[in-house]
């Protein structure tokens, strides 16, 4: 279900006010952000790799209040879209402040008639730790739960023979290891995941459950599906579009050139040591997060859910089991993800994979 469909459904059920909580933020310069927004179309926005809160407020109709985040940047004053009149608020991070406005509802039209800030003209109230005392019952419960989980989290589950570093722009030992574990666990030909889901690194030496949880904190499940070589090429191109950084991959070798136009940057792909074939069907592994069309991969929403195999295995649990069974673990960079600024596709490649109109 898209956000617009969810809003429409809530309105149909009789909602007076629709509030959207989104994990994306407003542009740092809101005036410049809106100027750029007006130059983009709806189609351009929904096919981009990242959608900000201002774009959601502008293109999704029927949201009254939008609460943004992700950027750890707050704004003292709300921003209101001039067209949809969606009111956008955004706090700083780590409970440093409380966002607070009061709205006036016009019930006959089920719309917001106005709003006001309540803290000296600002929508943000600064929170000072010394002004708040912990609730004794809640604090006792938290201590009890911490004791339970600390024992489990500190359990050593294996060893890293080398430091497993990550990268947000290309290959790295930890990136490769995670994708390899995903692919091997569901016996896929090719696996991919996003850089943003890998949140920490693992030092050489003993590895605990906590170490793995820090790397993969989101609880994403490994899924698999059947994909043509043509779709795999489209996925790779989408993640290299514009300033896109690409993907964490396994089972393949990808050569690309960022100097080429969007939709033509992938100049060669091998899967299983053989050239990618457009009409061949491959078994592909990814995460449940990406199969939903997130991170710009909207084409994955077109795959019927009945054709997606949900493994029931979390990515982090698969990684924990790998450490338990294969320690000491080694991983390295092996050239599977290559940027060549001089590479050009061969005539045969151009014939097999002409530029996609969606690129």
Image: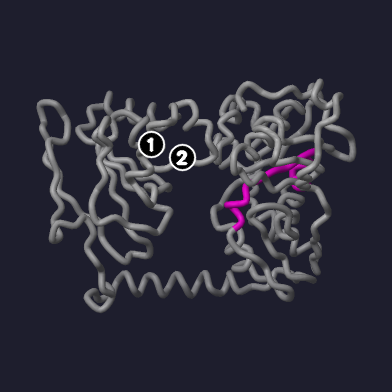
Q: How crowded is mark 2: few (under 14 residues within 10 Å), some or many (20 or more)?
A: some
Indicate the secondary structure of the residue bearing disc 1: helix
Q: Residues within 10 Å of mark 1 (few under 14, many from 20)?
A: many
Name the outermost residue toward the right: 273
Q: Is residue 355 magenta?
A: no
**Which residue is nearer to you in this view: 64 or 243?**
243
Q: In the rendering, at what x and y percent does residue 187 appear?
A: 79, 41
Find residue 349 and name its label: none
Q: In the rendering, at what x and y percent does residue 53 appear?
A: 38, 42
Say how the picture is coloured.
one colour
Q: Mark 1 points at which residue?
A: 56
Residue 231 in the figure: left or right of residue 359:
right
Q: Which residue is drawn at 73% across and 46% down?
A: 249
Find residue 51 and name its label: 2
- The relative height of residue 110 versus residue 257 in the rendered view (above or below) is above
Q: Residue at x 73, y 54 (%)?
A: 171
**Which residue is nearer to you in this view: 73 or 232?**
73
Residue 227 in the figure: left or right of residue 83:
right
Name the outermost residue toward the bottom: 130
**Which residue is nearer to you in this view: 183 or 273?**
273
């Amino acid at each position: 279900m898209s956000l617009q469909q969810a809003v429409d459904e809530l309105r149909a059920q009789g909602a007076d006010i629709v509030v959207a909580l989104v994990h994306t933020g407003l542009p740092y310069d809101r005036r410049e952000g809106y100027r750029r927004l007006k130059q983009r179309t709806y189609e351009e926005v929904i096919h981009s790799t990242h959608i900000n809160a201002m774009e959601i407020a502008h293109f999704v109709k029927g949201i009254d209040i939008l609460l943004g985040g992700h950027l750890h940047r707050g704004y003292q004053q709300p921003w209101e879209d001039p067209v949809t009149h969606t009111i956008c608020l955004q706090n700083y991070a780590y409970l440093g402040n409380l966002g607070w406005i009061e709205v006036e509802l016009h019930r006959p039209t089920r719309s917001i008639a106005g709003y006001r800030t309540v803290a000296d003209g600002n929508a943000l109230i600064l929170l000072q730790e010394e002004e708040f005392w912990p609730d004794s019952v809640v604090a006792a419960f938290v201590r009890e739960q911490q004791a339970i989980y600390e024992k489990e989290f500190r359990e050593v589950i294996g060893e890293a023979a080398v430091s497993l570093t990550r990268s947000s722009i290309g290959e790295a030992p930890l990136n490769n290891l995670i994708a390899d574990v995903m692919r091997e666990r569901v016996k896929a030909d090719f696996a991919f995941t996003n850089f943003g889901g890998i949140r920490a690194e693992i030092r050489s030496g003993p590895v605990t459950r906590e170490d793995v949880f820090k790397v993969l904190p989101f609880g994403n499940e490994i899924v698999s599906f059947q994909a043509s070589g043509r779709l795999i090429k489209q996925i790779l191109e989408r993640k290299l579009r514009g300033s896109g950084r690409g993907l964490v991959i396994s089972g393949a070798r990808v050569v690309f050139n960022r100097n080429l136009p969007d939709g033509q940057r992938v100049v060669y792909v091998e899967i299983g040591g053989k050239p990618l074939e457009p009409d061949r069907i491959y078994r592909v592994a990814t995460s449940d997060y990406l199969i939903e069309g997130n991170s710009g991969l909207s084409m994955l929403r077109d795959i019927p859910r009945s054709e997606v195999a949900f493994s029931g295995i979390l990515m982090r649990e698969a990684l924990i089991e790998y450490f338990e069974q294969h320690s000491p673990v080694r991983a390295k960079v092996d050239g599977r993800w290559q940027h060549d600024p001089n590479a050009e596709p061969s005539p045969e490649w151009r014939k097999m994979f002409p530029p996609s109109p969606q690129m």
